[in-house]
Amino acid sequence: MNYFKKYLLLLISMFCSMKSFECFEEYYSFGLFDKYLIFHEGNDNEYYNAWIYNDEINKSSNEKSENLHSWASYLDQVYTIEDLDVFIYRKNPNSFKSTSAEMTWLQSRRKKTPKNSTKENLFVEYISYALRVEDFMKKNAYSTWGDELENVDTQKFSPLISEGVTKLNSSGIDTHFKERYAYQLIKLYRHSNQLQQVINIYQSVFTNSKTNIGYYAMDQYAGTINKLGRTAEANYLFSQVYTNCPSRRDLAYYSLKIRTETELNAAKALCKNKEEKMTLHFIKAIKTKALALEDMKAIYTGLGDHEYLRLIISHEIHKIENASPNYNNYDENSKDDQERKLLNNQVFTYTKDLLKFNEDILQSGNNDDFWKLSCAYLNYLNGNFSKCSDILSEIPNSDKNYFIQKQIIYCVNLISSKTRLTEEDENKIGQILFDLNEGKASYPELNYLSNYYHGEYNSVIQDVFNMIRNKSQNNKFKELIFSGNGISSEMYSSDPSISKIDSLLTDIEKCPETKIAQYAASCYFGRSNIQVSNFNDCRNALNELKATILMRNPETLDESIAILQTLPPKYLNAFKISGNAFEINIKNRNFEKFDRVEDKLPHQNRLEFAQKLLKLYNERNIGNNLLKLAFAYYNSSYYGLQWKSMAYYRTYDYPSGNDNMNITRDLFTNAINSGNLSNDELVYAHYMVAMCQLNNYTKNRKQEIPQYDEWSFNNYFNQMIYGGVYKSFDNIKQLKSTSAYMQIVKECKYFRYYIN
């Protein structure tokens, strides 16, 4: 294989950011050329707004909805859609009672007297048959997308087929019911491998049908003749289903296979007009693995500026957006990087070809703003930043959605065109993002452009942040706010060092407070109970974090308090510490119960709590103050109910936040050595030393003590004993006569195991 072919294949595979199966393709788009903006005027177009991935531009009608409306119309609107839904789409097909009982229920739901009651009788009889076919097919039919059964017991199908044939040939039914029974028979014949019968039924009933049920039958018929090798005819019929039957559009899309120019021309030879021929080009072009430029040229020649053409070029732009590799740290000697460089050249070449096609359309006299937007964006992707800017300036601001798209392109083009952004540039970009998001700041998507239901989102903010971060000139604060992360998911969860926080506080003074920096800072530092709108808020947030981390060591409490005293009330009161952290308590802490009553308990803020800690620390040689201080630090850890005093989050799956127990262990040890404790208090202190050692051991092993079976528990526990984790328990055994000893025996399973 020559190099060009090799890298063309690489290019196509790169365009296919998807999972690929024999029949299904998934394509998730993360692009700035946003279909929800550029195709907003086509929302009511039933035929062509079907850019097939994720339902594309509009929601297609589903088969159930089409079927219900068809029946409502046929029955002269005597019944509501809701009542027909209940009657037809039962959870259990076997719930159908006798015909007379079902008729009684149906007639009780009439909105008006029917013109022809015979329709009701035929309807009830048909639904009885259709439900039995449905139930039978669930148990005996193969998956249309799976492996077909080679040996089918056709006798199983015979009773239902015979009944259907009798109904179909009955002189008492009209075309509506003939099509319904014929469709059920086609399914039965196809799944029993009686393919010629499928052909016979379809050709005798559906040849000139334009109904929805006719297109359902056409889909089945096309699949049948495709299996028989009549590929061209099958592809043509699938294109007709695609165009005319929204609920079967996705199935027709996946079923239609055009692999070569010969196959395309063979299907086109069956088309009745240019539009049908161009439909084949369109479906072929929007296949995920296609490069569609030649199809676009054919459509433009055949139909001019058709919506097909706009959909395809938008699809191709998304492919390019998702294909371009990132060349940070490119290595000339790396085979992979050399291939990536060649791949990038192919993407660049294809971008230029698309741009030339777009420019030809504009130069032909078509000045539609859509083609200006796509041309501007292709110029941006091609690195023609000045040309992109010129084209954007020609687009008026009268259309709201086009204006949004124009502003998005303007932002990324401006950033890419500069080696370093000026404050004026950053203010422009920030104001645009605020305006597009109605004065708010959100990441990564603009609020009203996100579409998580379809597995995708508009990545405007993400892309803009990444581009600006790359131009941050080694400013740690700027890198932080443009990282796309948030303080809760990053800083609060990682317990940053004091030196890191100090470096951020230093760099914030070197970072201009532009509009885009304010936007990014609001995204990064914002949380539900504190609104961050400027850099001073950011300083307060960083200082509050620094003070909280300093609280974790009693020797730096005075420094922590000094910082907390400078903070506005909204920061001091953002985190309430509920309950009594100074209580001497060895009982197992029930977090779920505490969470339920937490709001009803007395509470204090971090400054008040830190001041009480410092007072105890300064008076630690008095009585049992050191023991109280040690319990306060334990209760403020991951393992205590007052964990919010020195941390911001607590997971239930693994230790997190303030989970280092060394300082707390040392406080309990110092309390033991102080000589100020009673025997009961000594028991408590020795026990808590063991608990601190246990917590450190299980955290480092990343495994809690197994509780699910006796052998695992014993094995793990013995490992801890041999590792010296529970040496403090030996000291407790010397104080058996205390009430505290009996309490620990009662409360602690581990201690009972140890002494026995």
Image (cartoon, rainbow, N blue to C red):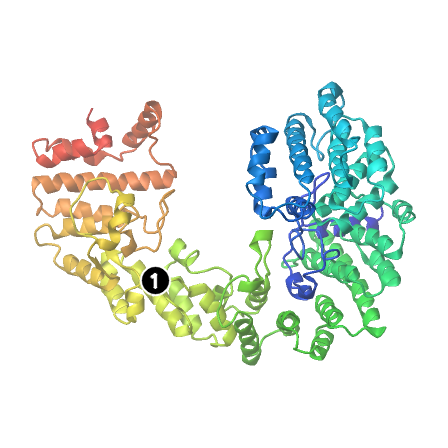
Question: Quarter-wise, where is residue 436 in the image?
Answer: bottom right
Q: Quadrant of the C terminus?
A: top left
Q: Position of residue 380 (x, y in %)?
A: 70, 69
Q: Is residue 18 left or right of residue 301?
A: left
Q: Front-most of 371 and 591? A: 371
Q: Quadrant of the N terminus?
A: top right
**Residue tagged by mark 1?**
545
Q: Element at badge 1?
A: helix
Q: Residue furthest bottom?
A: 424
Q: Front-most of 500 and 316? A: 316
Which residue lies at the image location 91% right of the left edge and 48% below the top edge?
265
Compared with 574, 52 (above or below) is: above
Asked whether the viewer can see residue 455, the reply is: no
Q: Position of residue 311 (x, y in %)?
A: 74, 60
Q: Is residue 640 left or right of residue 352?
A: left
Question: Quarter-wise, where is residue 307 in the image?
Answer: bottom right
**Crowding near the residue tagged with mark 1, few <14, some 14–19, many ≥20 C-alpha atoms within 10 Å:** many
Q: How many numbered marks, from 0 up?
A: 1
Q: Position of residue 491 (x, y in %)?
A: 41, 58
Asked whether the viewer can see residue 564, the reply is: yes
Q: Position of residue 193 (x, y in %)?
A: 78, 26
Question: Quarter-wise, where is residue 282 in the image?
Answer: bottom right
Compared with 480, 259 (above or below) is: above
Q: Is residue 674 left or right of residue 308?
A: left
Compared with 125, 557 (above or below) is: below
Which residue lies at the image location 14% right of the left edge and 44% below the top edge?
672
